[in-house]
């Protein structure tokens, strides 16, 4: 009989480096990461954590396919938490179109994006925004998941259309353009 070899997640095997000024505390499945930009807390499923002096090692609780997936996911989420409290995350959006613009008042983002009324979007707690020249929006947060979801919801209010490119797009996003109608007079009767 041959012995089965247990294969772990390649991403999950790598330890997460903890820079100076950041503390990681693990209590069972709950992990708290504190750093210069703030504090993040998250509950994990299927993994356990071993906190060392300047790194954290993630261990799977099961060696099944799901256990391997949770091993890699747990390590990636922990790394994003550490990066968030040290550097933070940023997403940039561009508002494109004639007369399209955005304004910010506190946590309320007002968008004029071609509808008969302005669209008011309430930014969630933990996300800050800056509006540059009325058409460029910069979102910042320490939580990567929250900022990605917020940027996606703002873009979803008016996604860029393929004919003229009008709408809200991520900065640097390439919009595949379509040719408009090219028919002229003199068609079939």
Image: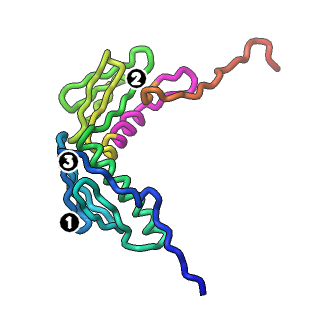
Task: Kindly indicate whether the residue at mark 1 contacts the one at mark 3 (C-beta within 8 angstroms).
Answer: no
The mark that comes first in sequence, 1 or 2, is 1
Residue at the image position 18 percent from the left and 29 percent from the top: 106
Magenta span contains residue 165: yes
The mark that comes first in sequence, 2 or 3, is 3
Residue at the image position 40 percent from the left and 63 percent from the top: 71
As measured in the structure, the alpha-carbon distance from the residue carrying label 1 to the one carrying label 2 is 44 Å
Disc nearest the viewer among 3 and 1: 3
Q: Quadrant of residue 117?
A: top left
Coloring basis for residues: rainbow
For residue 124, say whether it is visible: no
The mark that comes first in sequence, 3 or 1, is 3
Residue 161 falls left or right of residue 185: left
As measured in the structure, the alpha-carbon distance from the residue carrying label 2 to the one carrying label 3 is 36 Å
Region rendered in magenta:
148-166
Task: Kindly indicate whether the residue at mark 3 contacts the one at mark 2 (C-beta within 8 angstroms).
Answer: no
Residue at the image position 38 percent from the left and 68 percent from the top: 60
Residue situated in front as seen by the camera: 113 or 74: 74
Packing grade of label 3 (10 A; few <14, some 14-19, many >=20) is some
| Residue corresponding to mark 2 | 95
Residue at the image position 18 percent from the left and 49 percent from the top: 34
| Residue corresponding to mark 1 | 27
Q: Which mark is residue 151?
A: none
Figure check: 13 above or below 179: below
Question: Where does the image place residue 66, in percent across and percent down from the top left?
Answer: 46, 68
Disc nearest the viewer among 2 and 3: 3
| Residue corresponding to mark 3 | 22
Question: Where does the image place residue 19, in percent across and percent down from the top left?
Answer: 24, 46
Name the secondary structure under disc 2. Answer: strand
């Amino acid at each position: 009989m041959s012995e089965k070899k247990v294969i772990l997640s390649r991403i999950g095997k790598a330890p997460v480096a903890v820079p100076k000024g950041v503390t990681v505390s693990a209590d069972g499945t709950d992990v708290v990461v504190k750093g210069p930009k703030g504090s993040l807390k998250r509950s994990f499923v299927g993994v356990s954590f071993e906190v060392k002096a300047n790194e954290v090692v993630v261990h799977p609780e099961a060696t099944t396919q799901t256990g391997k997936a949770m091993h890699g996911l747990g390590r990636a989420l922990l790394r994003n938490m550490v990066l968030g409290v040290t550097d933070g995350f940023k997403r940039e959006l561009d508002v494109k179109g004639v007369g399209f613009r955005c304004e910010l008042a506190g946590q309320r983002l007002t968008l004029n994006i071609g509808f008969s009324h302005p669209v008011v979007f309430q930014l969630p707690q933990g996300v800050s925004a800056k509006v540059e020249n009325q058409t460029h929006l910069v979102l910042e947060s320490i939580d990567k998941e929250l900022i990605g979801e917020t940027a996606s919801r703002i873009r979803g209010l008016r996604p860029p259309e393929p004919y003229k490119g009008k709408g809200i797009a991520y900065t640097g996003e390439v919009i595949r353009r379509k040719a408009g109608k090219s028919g002229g007079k003199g068609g079939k009767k």
